[in-house]
Image (cartoon, rainbow, N blue to C red):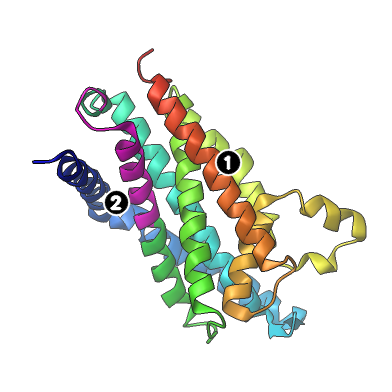
Amino acid sequence: MSHWQQYRVAYATIVIREILRFARIWVQTILPPAITTGLYFLIFGTLIGNRIGEMDGYSYQAFIVPGLILMAVITNSYANTVSSFFQAKYQRHIEELIISPVPNWIILAGYVTGGVARGLVVGVVVTLVTLFFSNVGVQHPWFTVLVVVLTSILFALGGFINAVFANSFDDITVIPTFVLTPLTYLGGVFYSISLLPDFWQKVSLANPVLYMINAFRYGILGVSDIRPTTALLLILGFILILGSAALWLLNRGVGIKN
């Protein structure tokens, strides 16, 4: 068996294990985002949305669809990778992978792909839920798919880095609670930044999640507060930075060897 065949088998094994891991406990991993999205639509879309009216030429229910979908993708891509890799560290079976003749980039790719798989599965489920509340067409299908996949990769990498530095199960909840959740809710999921005063519009531009949500909204609705190409380049830049950092940490054995 050639090296590339070995790498392919190793990569497929990690990915299949990751998919089976979240699929076995679908009640905890896939069902909750669907229920949460339904509640968001009932509260914000139906009860409050009727009072708000249109936003950027769409009903409020339609306007929040892209943000809710991408929020679920972000959260689950991150959560899957951080919990899975930390569990591998905690149970010490990651050491078997580290000493195996498998390059670290294959290990990283396997865990990230597992996170992306969960993020996309949840994204599809949440999208199906939104169809019960709002019938929204996709204006730019390929751009939409590109944005959601790249965003999922980005946050799966972020979850991996969080898991590398985590020393306890409490540590893997710090970033999602105090960083990820505020950035997501303030990233334009429920509103357009054009409604904000000039000062807060400029402050909002420092939030990277804003670019991702607006790029995704552009793909679905065709409207955005941010230039779609700018948002796409930002996502690619962050993937390059976080991917390089994650691979460097894995090569150095940070959080594993010590």
- Whether residue 172 sits left or right of residue 221 in the image: it is left
Q: Which residues are magenta?
A: 98-118
Q: As shown in the figure, which amino acid type bears the numbered disc 2?
A: Phe
Q: As shown in the figure, which amino acid type bears the numbered disc 1?
A: Thr
Residue placed most toward the observer, 53 or 188: 188
- Whether residue 29 sits left or right of residue 196 in the image: it is left
Q: Mark 1 or 2 closer to N-term? A: 2
- Residue 58, x across and y down, in percent: 69, 84
Quadrant (top left, top right, bottom left, bottom right) of the C terminus = top left
Would residue 32 be seen by someone viewing this image from the given angle?
Answer: yes
Residue 177, which numbered label?
1
Q: Which residue is mark 2?
A: 22
**Disc 1 from disc 2: Cα separation:** 21 Å
Dominant SS in magenta = helix
State yes or no: residue 109 in magenta: yes
- Whether residue 182 sits left or right of residue 193 in the image: it is left
Relative to 227, does residue 210 appear above or below in the rendering?
Answer: above
Would residue 189 be seen by someone viewing this image from the given angle?
Answer: no
Relative to 57, does residue 200 appear above or below in the rendering?
Answer: above
Which residue: 56% across, 39% down? 241
Tell me the SS state at disc 1.
helix
Most extreme residue toward the top is: 258
Q: Residues within 10 Å of mark 2 (few under 14, many from 20)?
A: some
Which residue: 35% across, 37% down? 105
- Residue 164, x across and y down, in percent: 43, 28
